[in-house]
Image (tube, rainbow, N blue to C red):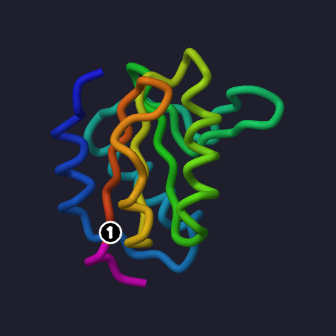
Amino acid sequence: MEEPKALLEAIRSTRFHYTSEDDLQRGLAALLDQLGVQYEREFHLDAQSRIDFLVEGGLGVEMKIDGPVSELGYQILRYLQHDAVKAMLVVTTRSSHRDLPPALEGKPVWVVYLFTSAF
């Protein structure tokens, strides 16, 4: 899967207002709606795995406002083991999450760090 440059830029240039991860998810859903991007929210990959968004073309999107990078890495790895997920995008407020590798399971991983968003 090629890098979704337009989507990444739209997320980076949006100022999200949130106090919780759920607020941040609602903000992303509104942005995706505005952009006309097809997605499913809270998509069940299996009985144990529910990804925040599965965007058209198989882009998985996970939103994180806390937690260690190691825990997030295992979560992303679990998602990428599913055929429905062709690549992952992590939208996060934690600078440490930028340390995720650029690929897992042979699939690309992109991270958007929201350092300018308001709480």
Q: Along the line of sight, which residue is nearer the eye, 107 or 50?
A: 107
Left or right? Give the position of 102 relative to 48. left
Residue numbers of the magenta segment? 115-119
Q: Measured from the top left, where is residue 29 in percent x and y? A: 44, 49
Q: Residue at x 48, y 64 (%)?
A: 24
Q: Along the line of sight, which residue is nearer the eye, 77 or 66?
A: 77
Q: Residue at x 26, y 40 (%)?
A: 35
Q: What is the three-letter code of the residue carrying label 1? A: Leu
Q: Quadrant of residue 44?
A: top right
Residue 66 counted in the magenta span: no
Q: Along the line of sight, which residue is nearer the eye, 102 or 82?
A: 102
| Disc 1: which residue | 114
In the rendered image of this protein, does residue 88 appear above or below residue 64? above
Residue placed furthest toward the bottom? 119
Q: Measured from the top left, where is residue 97 in percent x and y? A: 44, 62
In the rendered image of this protein, does residue 7 appear above or below residue 116? above
